[in-house]
């Protein structure tokens, strides 16, 4: 069996792998009837779109230390064959104590050759763009080029994918293509491929083991029971080991960092169950997950693969998990669109209903396209660096490579690839006197930075940071250098407060 070629379909109807009859209305078409051009074309176009958006956001300083800076430090550590240390999380902080993402080790060799934060953005754009291929190919085989282009464009431009591309870099970029290949294979009853594509998901993030288990449950339900049960057990055990063994053993507090906080009083199961479906933003998120498919997705049992992700998000007390922002819905997009193709392939959708779905899906995609981060590509500010950005680059250029820096959030993303950068708001409580960073830089116009005593001190107009001298302050950016015991900065510059530039 060719695991990688999910578009290959036999010319004669036959029983699917694992036994069982082929589903009604899913008569396969000859593989040679359509070329792979639509899938490859859309994948290439979306790669350029994703890369343009993320690269330009980084160029104009809209990326942040949390999270592009952190993942740059992780890739840099792997390229040096060390544990994935992330100084932005704390001195000597091993990132495997935060989330279980050993798959990021594959970034090490690439970062070794191309040591830049842009390397991560290119990889992320490529990973997401690849996920367009299996979904579009399946749609092509099911209903021809028009259906394939609609599905491929709607998926590639979906809001969940856009949010992932916009918010820096995240490990779930690896999960998106793995899920696309696995769920498409499951829908096409290529059970072995579905299992093999699902297994690496356990290495992407600790919660995705439960998604692996959900894929296993689907395989056991619709295909070979034994293989499905084994995959489900593997996924559940992988998540349990990550959350109860690996992460606590590495985390400095000796626990999984994302357990919900203890409640002052115990709530009844009924109250907790009701809270899962409230507030209404959760219903809006559910609606917008399936709306770009014209609601075709709700006609497919493949949607069960979404349940673990929706479960932990909606039962959490953290509001950021409930809505459409950030990267949390990216792993749901390939499942939704694969489910839509599956509904059509299984004969559950008549032609008139398919036309209605196309109109609804096109409207939903159009609305979310112009409200999602993709609209930034047509804004002049995305392509023209502001005066503030140019001044920032000049000031950051005074910081030598290989040194230690405490920086505000957005500035940290610019420095992570060439310095050892930490979060300025962690200073001084997280540093021993001998470990204080050589440089300190803060941008008081950074809206992504939380309030902190150090930042407020630097905003006040005087560098009230003991042991540091002001090197330059311009456009709201303060650059300070540590003063050694002799009263000199390491760079040998004249001691004294320089005149502030206009």
Image: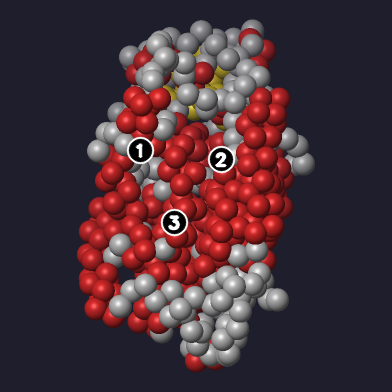
Q: Residue at x 25, y 38 (%)?
A: 280
- Measure the alpha-carbon separation of dots 1 and 2: 16 Å
Position of the C terminus by quadrant: top left
Q: Residue at x 60, y 58 (%)?
A: 220
> Does dot 2 land on a helix, a strand or a loop?
loop
Q: Residue at x 47, y 60 (%)?
A: 302
Q: Residue at x 42, y 30 (%)?
A: 316
Percent across and percent down for residue 395 are 45, 34
> Does dot 1 land on a helix, a strand or a loop?
loop
Q: Nearer the viewer, residue 315 or 85?
A: 315
> Does dot 3 land on a helix, a strand or a loop?
helix
Percent across and percent down for residue 258 are 52, 27
Q: Give the farthest residue toward the right.
A: 81
Residues at circles 1 and 2 in contact by the CB criterion of under 8 Å: no
Q: Residues within 10 Å of mark 1 (few under 14, many from 20)?
A: many
Above or below, 292 relative to 71: below
Mark before the other along the chain sequence, 1 or 2: 2
Q: Residues within 10 Å of mark 2 (few under 14, many from 20)?
A: many
Mark before the other along the chain sequence, 3 or 1: 3
Residue that label 2 marks = 207
Above or below, 478 relative to 295: above
Residue that label 3 marks = 303
Above or below, 474 relative to 53: above
**Coloring basis for residues:** secondary structure
Q: Nearer the viewer, residue 172 or 27?
A: 27
Q: Residues within 10 Å of mark 3 (few under 14, many from 20)?
A: many
Residue that label 1 marks = 322
- Measure the alpha-carbon separation of dots 3 and 2: 17 Å
The mark closer to the camera, 3 or 1, is 3
């Amino acid at each position: 069996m060719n695991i990688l070629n999910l578009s290959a379909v036999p010319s004669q109807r036959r029983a699917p792998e694992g036994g069982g009859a082929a589903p009604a209305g899913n008569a396969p078409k000859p593989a040679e009837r359509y070329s792979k051009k639509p899938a490859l074309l859309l994948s290439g176009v979306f790669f350029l779109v994703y890369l343009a958006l993320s690269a330009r956001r980084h160029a104009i300083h809209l990326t942040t230390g949390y999270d592009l800076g952190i993942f740059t430090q992780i890739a840099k550590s792997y390229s040096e064959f060390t544990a994935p240390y992330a100084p932005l999380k704390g001195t000597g902080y091993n990132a495997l104590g935060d989330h279980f993402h050993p798959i990021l080790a594959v970034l090490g060799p690439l970062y070794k050759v191309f040591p830049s934060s842009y390397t991560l953005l290119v990889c992320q754009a490529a990973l997401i763009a690849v996920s367009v291929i299996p979904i579009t190919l399946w749609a092509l085989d099911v209903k021809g080029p028009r259906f394939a282009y609609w599905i491929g464009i709607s998926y590639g431009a979906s809001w969940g994918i856009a949010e992932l591309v916009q918010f820096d870099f995240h490990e779930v970029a690896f999960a998106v293509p793995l899920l696309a290949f696995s769920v498409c294979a499951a829908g096409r009853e290529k059970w072995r491929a579905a299992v093999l594509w699902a297994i690496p998901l356990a290495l992407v993030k600790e919660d995705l083991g439960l998604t692996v288990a959900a894929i296993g449950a689907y395989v056991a339900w619709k295909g070979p029971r034994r293989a499905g049960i084994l995959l489900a057990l593997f996924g559940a055990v992988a998540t349990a080991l990550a959350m109860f063994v690996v992460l606590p053993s590495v985390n400095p507090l000796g626990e999984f960092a994302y357990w919900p906080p203890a409640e002052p009083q115990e709530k009844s199961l009924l109250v907790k169950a009701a809270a899962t479906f409230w507030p209404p933003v959760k219903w809006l998120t559910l609606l917008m997950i399936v709306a770009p498919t014209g609601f075709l997705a709700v006609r497919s049992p493949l949607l069960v693969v979404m349940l673990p992700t929706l479960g932990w998000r909606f039962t959490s007390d953290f509001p950021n998990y409930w809505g459409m922002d950030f990267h949390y819905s990216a792993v749901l997009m390939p499942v939704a669109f694969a489910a839509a193709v599956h509904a059509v392939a299984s004969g559950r959708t008549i032609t008139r209903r398919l036309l209605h779905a196309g109109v609804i899906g096109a409207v939903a995609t159009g609305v979310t396209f112009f409200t999602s981060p993709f609209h930034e590509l047509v804004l002049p500010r995305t392509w023209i660096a502001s005066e503030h950005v140019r001044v920032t680059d000049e000031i950051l250029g005074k910081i030598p490579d290989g040194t230690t820096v405490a920086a505000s959030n957005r500035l940290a993303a610019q420095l992570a690839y060439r310095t050892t950068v930490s979060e300025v708001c962690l200073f001084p409580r997280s540093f021993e006197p001998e470990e204080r960073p050589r440089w300190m830089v803060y941008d008081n116009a950074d809206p992504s930075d939380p309030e902190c005593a150090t930042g407020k001190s630097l905003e006040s107009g005087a560098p009230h940071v003991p042991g540091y001298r002001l090197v330059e302050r311009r456009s709201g950016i303060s650059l300070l250098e540590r003063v050694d015991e002799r009263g000199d900065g390491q760079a040998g510059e004249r001691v004294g407060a320089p005149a502030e530039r206009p």
